[in-house]
Image (cartoon, helix red, strand yellow):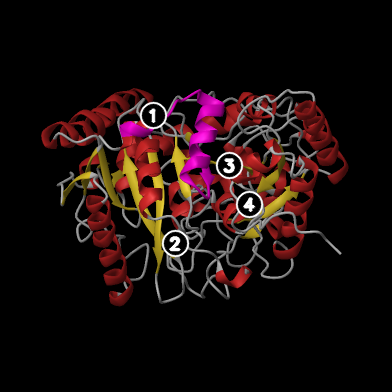
């Protein structure tokens, strides 16, 4: 009979670290319990299908034993020494010592071996974090890079990730960001944290791939500013827009992670000095083409949002409501968003760079053109019923955008989103942060500007219990302000919604 050392559904990294420091638990016991929770609900039980590969148990326990021994000898590598973490599976390369593949969601890379771990992974390991395994994702990281009908959280290699909150999982005919969808390409990572498979998980974000699934999993999340970490060995749709993000159950965990990987400090008093502008929830809502409109649910979310503003004001946070923010349409290039325009050009180049990090003898693919051909030859695996076209992948292969035009578009887009967008709003209204419902396109501004973003949970809708929350943007290099806000927010809203079907 398994021993329960803690509740994996509610335990935070900070709480586990306190138990470790008091010698009330070991990393071996922590790892053992998380593995038991994965066994209980990933492929069995509720069948969330969030975790695709785990580091072999023998190897995991050996790593945990070594870290426990270091702690007993007075060595702690970081504030997260001995704490488990999951990686977005298919786009972050780990070394051969961990014995987990990096497949980008495709069967074509099932046996491909990375030459070495991505520098970011090496940093996590050096900091004493324990990589439990890798999570499911949208094949090729989303933004319709296989076909436009592909549901977030689905890959041919891993199947469909399910929400930890929505009983019965994905509804038939669901829209891309519908109420039963897990949301975003980092869905497996978000669901893993919410389901108690790990206390922390890593995702990558082009245009909402971290914050959107975190929103649907009632998590706190921090997307770091673009350029914060080396992206070598990490698959990116776009070198211009992609960044690393972390998902957690508390604002304190975000702080611990930021301190571990970026040495970011935290001044509690600074949170009280923040000035936050909240965008109008009627203007900033999810487009009906992405999520079916449910009047009652829409009204629930708006009322929760307005209630959050009121409670934060009562707690002393300096807030301006209904701050006007330019429409995302200002960032369009013709009929496409600027992100789609630039990422469509950069994708095949980023793809070729990523596969060059595999050992050549183990990888049958060197380009997007090779990938298209491989999928056609192995259509039973790569293009199953319901997912049988790869039109967007073909368009990426055939993209003939002028490199010069794209090179000009990047700084122009940055200027529109940053100087004439976020910066102008912040300066005009004398505020530090912009907040909006996460069920909106506000995260696009952060992506185009290259700015950091934090996500905080708010509540659930009665329709099916799926969570919703608030996203907040700061200028580049101001992650600390986002952490200040998340900390202040957590004091006002101390309890995040739990996935009732797992309790």
Secondary element type, mark 2: loop
Q: How many marks?
A: 4
Q: CA distance from mark 2 to mark 1?
A: 39 Å
Q: Which residue was labeled with disc 4?
A: 136
- Given this view, does label 2 or label 4 mark the residue nearer the observer? 4
The part of the chain drawn in magenta is 244-270
Per the rendering, the mark at residue 176 is 2
Which residue is painted at 33% across and 38% down in the image?
A: 446
- Of the two numbered discs 2 and 3 on the same chain, state the one appearing first in sequence: 3
Q: CA distance from mark 2 to mark 4?
A: 17 Å
Residue 83 on the magenta span: no
Q: Which residue was labeled with disc 1?
A: 267
- Of the two numbered discs 1 and 4 on the same chain, state the one appearing first in sequence: 4
Q: CA distance from mark 3 to mark 1?
A: 17 Å
Determine whether label 1 and label 4 are within 8 Å by CB. no
Q: Residue furthest left?
A: 428
Q: Quadrant of residue 486?
A: top left
- Given this view, does label 2 or label 3 mark the residue nearer the observer? 3
The image shows residue 433 at horizontal and vertical percentages of 26, 38
Q: Which residue was labeled with disc 3?
A: 14
- Of the two numbered discs 3 and 1 on the same chain, state the one appearing first in sequence: 3
The image shows residue 298 at horizontal and vertical percentages of 29, 69
Which residue is painted at 38% across and 39% down in the image?
A: 453
Q: CA distance from mark 1 to mark 4?
A: 36 Å
Label 1 crowd (10 A; few <14 / some 14-19 / many >=20): few
- Given this view, does label 4 or label 3 mark the residue nearer the observer? 3
Q: CA distance from mark 4 to mark 3?
A: 25 Å
- Given this view, does label 1 or label 4 mark the residue nearer the observer? 1
């Amino acid at each position: 009979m398994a021993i329960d050392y803690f509740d994996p559904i509610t335990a935070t990294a900070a709480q586990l670290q306190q138990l470790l420091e008091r010698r009330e638990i070991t990393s071996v016991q922590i790892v053992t319990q998380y593995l038991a929770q994965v066994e209980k609900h990933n492929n069995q039980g509720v069948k969330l299908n969030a975790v695709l590969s785990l580091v072999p148990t023998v190897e995991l326990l050996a790593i945990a034993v070594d870290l426990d021994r270091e702690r007993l000898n007075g060595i702690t590598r970081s504030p997260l020494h001995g704490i488990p973490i999951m990686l977005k599976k298919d786009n972050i390369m780990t070394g051969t010592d961990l014995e987990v593949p990096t497949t980008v969601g495709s069967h074509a890379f099932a046996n491909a071996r990375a030459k070495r771990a991505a520098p970011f992974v090496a940093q996590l390991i050096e900091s004493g974090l324990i990589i439990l395994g890798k999570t499911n994702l949208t094949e090729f990281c989303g933004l319709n890079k296989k076909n436009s009908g592909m549901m977030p959280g689905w890959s041919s290699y891993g199947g469909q990730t399910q929400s930890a909150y929505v009983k019965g999982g994905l509804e038939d005919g669901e829209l891309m960001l519908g109420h039963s969808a897990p949301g975003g390409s980092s869905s497996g990572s978000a669901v893993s944290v919410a389901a108690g498979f790990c206390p922390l998980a890593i995702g990558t974000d082009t245009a909402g791939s971290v914050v959107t699934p975190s929103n649907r999993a009632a998590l706190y999340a921090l997307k770091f500013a673009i350029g914060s970490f080396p992206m070598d060995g990490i698959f990116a749709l776009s070198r211009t827009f992609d960044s690393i993000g972390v998902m957690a159950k508390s604002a304190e965990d975000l702080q611990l992670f930021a301190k571990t990987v970026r040495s970011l400090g935290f001044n509690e008093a600074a949170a009280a000095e923040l000035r936050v502008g909240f965008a109008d929830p009627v203007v900033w809502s999810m487009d009906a083409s992405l999520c079916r409109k449910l009047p009652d649910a829409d009204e629930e979310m708006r009322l929760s949002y307005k209630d959050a503003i009121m409670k934060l004001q009562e707690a002393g946070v300096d807030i301006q409501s209904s701050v006007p923010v330019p429409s995302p349409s200002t960032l369009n290039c013709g009929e496409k968003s600027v992100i789609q325009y630039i990422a469509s050009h950069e994708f095949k180049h980023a793809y070729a760079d990523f596969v060059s990090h595999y050992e050549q003898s183990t990888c049958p693919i060197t380009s997007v053109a090779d990938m298209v051909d491989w999928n056609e030859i192995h259509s039973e695996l790569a293009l199953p019923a319901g997912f049988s076209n790869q039109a967007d992948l073909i368009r990426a292969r055939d993209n003939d955008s002028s490199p010069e035009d794209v090179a000009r578009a990047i700084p122009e887009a940055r200027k529109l989103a940053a100087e004439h967008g976020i910066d102008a709003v912040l300066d005009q209204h004398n505020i530090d942060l912009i907040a909006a419902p996460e069920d909106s396109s506000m995260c696009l501004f952060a992506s185009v500007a290259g700015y950091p973003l934090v996500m905080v949970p708010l509540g659930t809708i009665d329709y099916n219990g799926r969570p919703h929350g608030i996203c907040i943007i700061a200028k580049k290099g101001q992650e600390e302000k986002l952490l200040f806000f998340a900390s202040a927010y957590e004091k006002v809203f101390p309890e995040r919604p739990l996935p009732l079907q797992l309790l």
